[in-house]
Image: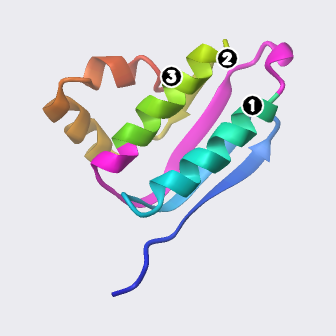
Amino acid sequence: MQKSQAEVTQQNKQKYLISGTVDFSTVPDLLRKISGLISASDASEDKPVMIDLSQVLECNSAALALMLEIVESAKQKNIELYFENMPATISTIARAYGVEDEIREYCR
């Protein structure tokens, strides 16, 4: 069985792209990388941090947990953050867990 792979790529100072498979095996590394990047982003620029999910190929409930953790981390650091291009799978999972409204608040 092939191991899942996912990457975080910095597009510019305030925008990041997550690509690949976001599942239980890739989320710990993604969370570590994203947390570091968000902490290093320039919150003084008065622009929100954007995380683009358009290149997520596969995902499960771990992707939703990752998003919620990123939101919480950004809140604690007073960083405005949004997700772009949320996969329909995550929306469906969020609805099933009763957190769709909460996660949609951070989607553009």
Query: How far across and how far down the image is residue 5, in percent?
Result: 50, 70
Asked if residue 15 shows in the view, the reply is no
| Label 1 packing within 10 angstroms: few (<14), some (14-19), many (20+) | few
Q: Secondary structure at mark 1?
A: helix
Mark 2–mark 1 CB contact (< 8 Å): yes
* The magenta stretch spans residue 22: no
Cα–Cα gap, marks 3 and 1? 13 Å
Cα–Cα gap, marks 2 and 3? 9 Å
Query: How far across and how far down the image is residue 42, in percent?
Result: 84, 25
Q: Is residue 44 above or below residue 58?
A: above
| Nearer to us in this view, 20 or 75 | 75
**Of marks 2 and 1, which one's residue comes earlier in the chain?**
1
Q: How is the image coloured?
A: rainbow
Cα–Cα gap, marks 2 and 1? 8 Å
Q: Is residue 7 above or below residue 65?
A: below
User: Where is mark 3, residue-wise?
Assistant: 72
What number is the disc on residue 28?
none
Query: How far across and how far down the image is residue 35, in percent?
Result: 65, 38
Q: Is residue 39 above or below residue 77?
A: below
**Of marks 3 and 1, which one's residue comes earlier in the chain?**
1
Q: Could you tell me the amino acid type at mark 2?
A: Lys
**Quarter assignment of residue 16:** top right
User: Where is mark 1, residue-wise?
Assistant: 39
**Magenta-highlighted residues:** 42-63
